[in-house]
Image: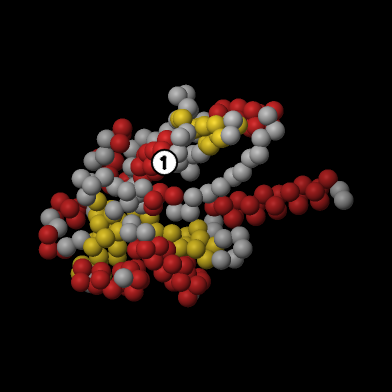
Amino acid sequence: MTHTTMRQMNSAVVNHMFDQMCFNQMHASKGIELFKERAVAGLFKEYKQLNDMAVVGKASYEQLTDEDKKRALRAINLIKEKRDGKIKGRTCADGSKHRMFVPREDASSPTLAVESLMALLVVFAHEKRDVAVFDVPGAYLHADLPADKFVLLKIEGHFVDIMVDVNPDFKEGVRFKNAKKALYVQILKALYGMIESALLWYELFSTVLKEEGFEVNKIDKCIAQKYVNGKPCTISGSPTG
C-alpha cells in the first residue's frame, strides 16, 4: 500500500467522522422529511421522556400574562441519526432569551479541568486502580428547577400534536396563533438548552455525592473522593458536557 493510498484512506476516515459529528443532527422538520415515521417515533419517545420524568407540566393559558408569554423559551426539536442507524429525537429550549434575565452567577457551572483529568489518569495508572466510565441518561432532566422559578416552554406546529398524543391533558392548553398551533407548558426541570441547566445539574451531582460520603475537591469541584474499605474511590465528571 502506497503512502498516497494511506493518506487517502485516512482522509476518508476523518471526513466520515466529521460528517458523523457535525452533519447527522438536523432540525426535526428536515428529519421528518428525510426519515418519515422513524423520525416521528424518535420525537414521540423524546416527548414521552419529558412527560414521564415530569420535565414539563401544564400551564393555565388564561392565567399567563403577556410578559410570561414574552419570556417563554421556544422549543427546538432536533433529529439525530446515530452511528448504528437509529433515529433519536431531542427537544431542548432556546435559552438565549434568558441571557438578559438570568444573572451570570446563576448560570455558570464548574467544569472538570483538562489538567485535573490528566493528573487523575496518571494517579490511576500508578496505583493500578480499576477505572469505569459511565453516563447518566438524561442527566440534566433529573435536576429540579427552584420552586420560585417560573419558566415556560412554547411548543409550536405539529410538535404540539406529538405532545398531546403523549399526554392528552395538555390538549386544553392548545391555542392557535397566526393559524399555527401553540402550547405553553411549564418547565419543571433542567431542560437542555436553558442557560442555568448545567449549574442545576452540578448542584444535584455534588449534593448526591456529599450525601454518599464523598468529599468534593477544593481546587477542582468536579472531583470527589471517599474511602471504601480503606481504598480510595474517586469520581470525576463534567456536568456541562
Q: Which of these two is toward me, 35 or 53?
A: 53
Identify whether 218 is placed above or below 141.
above
The residue to which callout 1 is attached is: 208
Image quarter for residue 107?
top left
Image quarter for residue 119?
top right
Q: Residue furthest right?
A: 1
* Residue 32 as seen in the image, left or right of residue 155: right
Q: Position of residue 36 (x, y in %)?
A: 48, 74
Q: Residue furthest front?
A: 229
Q: Position of residue 24 (x, y in %)?
A: 54, 59
SS assignment at label 1: helix
* Residue 214 as seen in the image, left or right of residue 196: right
Q: Which of these two is toward me, 144 or 12?
A: 144
- The answer to whether residue 196 is visible is yes
Identify whether 58 is placed above or below 109.
below
Q: Position of residue 59 (x, y in %)?
A: 20, 61
Q: Position of residue 169 (x, y in %)?
A: 25, 71
How many marks the image carries: the answer is 1
| Residue at the spot 59% in from the left edge and 30% down from the top edge | 230
| Residue at the spot 39% in from the left edge and 52% down from the top edge | 141
Residue type at tag 1: Val
Answer few, some or many: residues within 10 Å of disc 1's Cα (few below 14, many 20 plus, some between 14 and 19): few
- The answer to whether residue 176 is visible is no
| Residue at the spot 49% in from the left edge and 63% down from the top edge | 88
Q: Which of these two is toward me, 174 or 22?
A: 174
| Residue at the spot 57% in from the left edge and 60% down from the top edge | 82
Identify whether 140 is placed above or below 41.
above
